Image: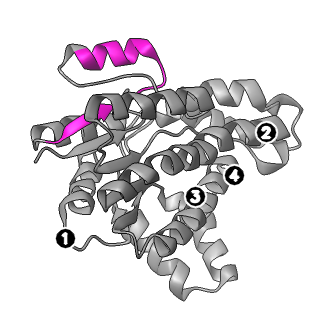
Amino acid sequence: MERTILITGCSSGIGLDAARGLKARGWRVFATCRQEPDCERLRAEGLESFVLDYADEASVEAAVAEVVTRTGGKLDALYNNGAFACPGAVEDLPRGALRAIFETNLFGYHDLTRRVIPLMRAQGGGRIINCSSVLGLVALKWRGAYVATKFAMEGLTDVLRIEMADTGIKVILIEPGPIGTSIREKAIPHFERWIDWQNSARAAEYATLRGRLYQAGPKDRWELPASAVTEKLIHALESARPKARYYVTTPTYLMGFARRILSTRLLDWVIAKV
């Protein structure tokens, strides 16, 4: 029987590669984007696409209703992928910046997940896959807002996995490290909106951060293409016994190992060298 999956954040990067890759494997893919022009572009290449904006509760509700209409209430899998970053020192993050990023990176995931669970319960099972990050395992400077959402999402996902153990619904985390996407460029508007770096006590230190944001630098030595995430996603979706966690890229394996064996002080020292 045809397998169905709802994927968020498909305008580019990890979500777009996942949508294309799964469609090629015979999945019926609902490839959602935050903006209608991106959906139009995906429809032009043969994908089923409609708007889903995590920050808009009505949009999340409407997207699930669209899936129900198109499938008669059947959904085999959900891949929560869409997210954004707001770089800056923690001391420079205003309340509004954290509220905005949590609305998308955590609350939107949670809202969408809650709305599809009844569909999966009714059919006796399904897969819920949340795209986390190496930054859901360890913290790095200048990434406090993003790290906070990923740490919170990891905890919420772990609890959901335990609670869903008797339902046939598998709950899974994918944790990529550096992947070749446009997340850095897309972070610029959020940085410019929220971070008053000129008046920061760390104004001089922002030169390095701004250089990374605004200038195309060399490729990260550990960077992998989005297809590396799709490869793990396919296993998470199609394996009879999926793992609870899938690491992607060498840094994620290294940091996952370091977090388990190093003291907090030593781990802080290691991360400071990154």
| Closer-to-camera residue (247/243) | 243
Type of amino acid at the residue the image marks with label 4: Gly
Residue at image coords 64%, 86%: 263
Q: In the drawing, does residue 226 fall left or right of residue 238?
A: right
- Sequence-first tag of 3 and 1: 3
The answer to whether residue 212 of the structure is visible from this angle is yes
Q: Which residue is mark 1?
A: 240
Return the x and y of residue 267 as percentages of the image width and height.
61, 77
Q: Which residue is mark 4?
A: 144
Q: Which residue is mark 2?
A: 204
Element at label 2: helix
How many callouts does the rendering have? 4
Magenta stretch: give its range: 27-43
- Sequence-first tag of 2 and 1: 2
- Sequence-first tag of 1 and 4: 4
Element at label 3: helix
Residue at image coords 87%, 38%: 200
